[in-house]
Structure formats: C-alpha cells, structure tokens
Amino acid sequence: TSEVWGRRRSAVLLVQSESRHRMMSAPPAHVTRVAVAPTPSGELVLVATLATKKQTQLISVDASSGELVHRGIVGHDVFASEAEAMEALRARFCGGKSIPAIVHGHAFLGMVHTSTQVQVLVASEVRRDPLPGGHSMCTVGRTQWVSAPLPSAAGRPPLSKTDGEGLERLKDFTVSGFHFYSETYDLTRPYPSPRPVLGYDPNYCWNEWLASPFEKAGLRACCVVLLQGLACSKVLRVGQRGVAVALISRKNISNPGTRYNARGLNDVAGAGNEMESEQIVW
C-alpha cells in the first residue's frame, strides 16, 4: 500500500562540526548564469554559463525552424568567460552596439517554438538552500517568458485557435514557488543519489517536453531538471551546536491533478498526486 500511495524515506548523514559549518556558510564558487538577448534583426541568442563548466556558450536560434544551433567551436560559440561571449554577441549580431532588452536569469527552464515564433522560459529569481557536499537546491521564485517572431516566418499561417489557446495555458501554468532544481545534484532520487544530474528519473521531471529543444540540439545540460514540490533546508541550534536539516518533497508526474481528476490509479498505474518525501540531517 505504501508503494502505491506514496513513499517516505529519511537519510541521515553525520559530519564533523567544522565541515558542517563550511558547507552551510561558504557560497558556491560558481553558479549558473543565463541570458536571452534579442538582436536588432529580431533573433534570439541564448547565453549560458553553467555551474558544471568553466566556459560560456552562445546558442543561436535558427531563423527558419526555430531550433537551437550550437557548434561547440572555441571562439565562435564557446568562450572562456561571459564577458568574452557577450562581446562576441555584440560584434556578430548587434554591429558592436549594446544589446537592447537583454534578460538575465539563473536557469533555462524550457523552450517552445512554433512555425512563427520562439519562446524561452527563464528563472529570473531563485532561492538557494544548501545540501551536503556543497550542493544546493534552487526554488524558482520568479519566471519570465522571452518571445520573438521567427525572421523567416513571413507568409506562414498563424497558429490555430486551439494551438494558440494551448500555448497560453502553458504560459499561465504556475512555476514560481512550486518548483525547484539543482545545478549539480540529482534530486529525483532519494539521498544520496548515485546518478549524475542528467541521469535523472523522468517520473519526477516536470519540464521534459519543454527541455526537448535543448535535448535535440545536444544541449540538455543547459536546461535544468525541474521538479515540483518543496525543497528547503535550515540550520537549527541544538545546545552549542548547529544541526542542518533539509526537507525534500517531490511530486510524481504519472497522475497529477485536482482531487476530482486524479484519484486512485490511472491507466499506467500512477497513483493520484503521489509525493515522495525525505529528510536529510547533517
């Protein structure tokens, strides 16, 4: 019964006081930074500096198909620093001028492209909560959709009414405050996970479809694995010592919905609104 209606696991890790203090107080040496830059010609260019890589990547959007393009060539779309990448972006796409209306953020959450436009979802604000080993959990606080028409879409029919309404419902879906991710750790499995970030369990990834354009371009690492639920940690004082406690609750994607639409088991044996929770103490 517990396997059907939910699972609860608890992991306890004991470490030395000095190590505990260091993990909770020292900020990460490098965190992910992203940006979306609309060019004067109407194209979108994505800039990604990942926590897991030292270089900065420039990712362009094909003017006809809307697909992501990245060749992985140093000096062309791979640069040693974000400043070098932005300088190359200005020189190649903006005639050396400043980039208007650039949108900065902490992560790419996904992308949608149709026959006439492309839209990128960016996490513009996040709250970071530490985990053991210097990892962190990022709860999305605010998001922003950045859209642009495809320059080569002139003459193509617009979206149908049904597709347009579906796109609007997707954009209205609430992400802020209810979703989280980690740049360097697999949160889709109980702690400690033996898998890398991209070895995630798809049953707990809520942006699989939104991340598919990145996957197709060989850039899956540039789009975070988004989970739904709660992720937080806090240091509690126990006498003269500090004890760190983290709580993670992740929702399964198999059978989500309101209580009237997601009851019992569905046709793939997914339990209605199944949650898996764990507590980590160190």
Image: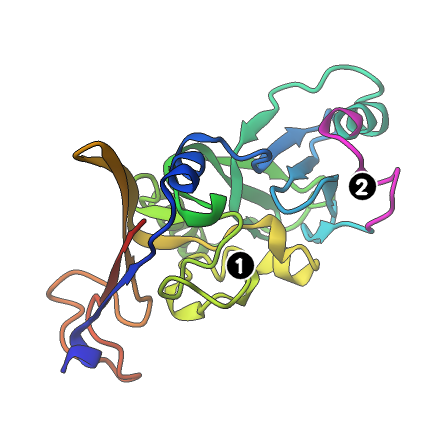
What residue occupies the far top of the structure in this picture? 97
Q: In the image, which is nearer the foreground, mark 1 or mark 2? A: 1
Residue ID at (26%, 71%): 255
Disc 2 marks a residue whose amino acid type is Val
Give the residues in magenta. 72-84
Q: How is the image coloured?
A: rainbow
What mark, if any, has residue 139 been given in the picture? none
Front-most of residues 160 and 37: 37
Q: Which residue is mark 1?
A: 197
Q: Classify 220 as above or below 273.
A: above
Q: Secondary structure at mark 1?
A: helix
Q: Secondary structure at mark 2?
A: strand
The image position of residue 91, as x and y in percent, is: 85, 24
Residue ID at (50%, 55%): 210
Q: Is residue 28 magenta-colored?
A: no
Give the side of residue 14 with respect to residue 112, left or right: left
Q: Which residue is mark 2?
A: 78
Give the side of residue 43 with respect to residue 118, left or right: right
Q: Residues within 10 Å of mark 2 (few under 14, many from 20)?
A: many
The image position of residue 43, as x and y in percent, is: 70, 35
